[in-house]
Image (tube, rainbow, N blue to C red):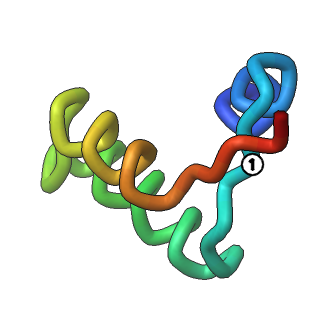
Amino acid sequence: MVMYAFLGLNGYFLEVRDREVVQMMEHLATYEENQESLAQWLEKNSISTV
């Protein structure tokens, strides 16, 4: 939720299904993903609103 709010405050919107967000957070929690892969995922799935 904080990530989503941060993106919104900076003029971005996360354009993925809720399930994909949940999966990414689960993978981060279990160390299947890391900060670098999260950054790449955000870049791929975020669109500018400005």
Task: Give the vertical position of 15 relative to 9 (above or below).
Answer: below
Specify whether residue 18 is in view. Answer: yes
Residue 1 shows in the view = no
Taking the image as shown, residue 7 lies to the left or right of residue 22, namely: right
State the residue in front, 1 or 5: 5
- Report the side of 50 relative to 24 (left or right): right
**Quadrant placement of the N terminus:** top right
Looking at the rendering, which quadrant does residue 21 occupy?
bottom right
SS class, disc 1: strand
Q: Residue furthest front?
A: 50
Who is closer to the viewer here, 17 or 48? 48
Which residue is at 72% across, 38% downward?
12
Q: Residue at x 52, y 75 (%)?
A: 20
In percent of the image, x 66 and y 80: which residue is there? 17
Residue 35 against residue 25 in the figure, above or below: above
Label 1: few (<14), some (14–19) or many (≥20) C-alpha neighbours in 10 Å: some
The kind of residue tagged 1 is Phe
Q: Quadrant of the C terminus?
A: top right
> Residue 20 vs residue 38: left or right?
right
Give the residue at x 85% y 19%.
Answer: 9
Please tell me how many numbered marks the rendered image carries: 1
Viewer-proximal residue, 25 or 43? 43
Q: Position of residue 14 (x, y in %)?
A: 67, 54
Counting from the top left corner in percent of width and height, residue 3 is at 65, 31
Quadrant housing residue 2: top right
Q: Which residue is mark 1?
A: 13
Q: Nearer the viewer, residue 12 or 4?
A: 12
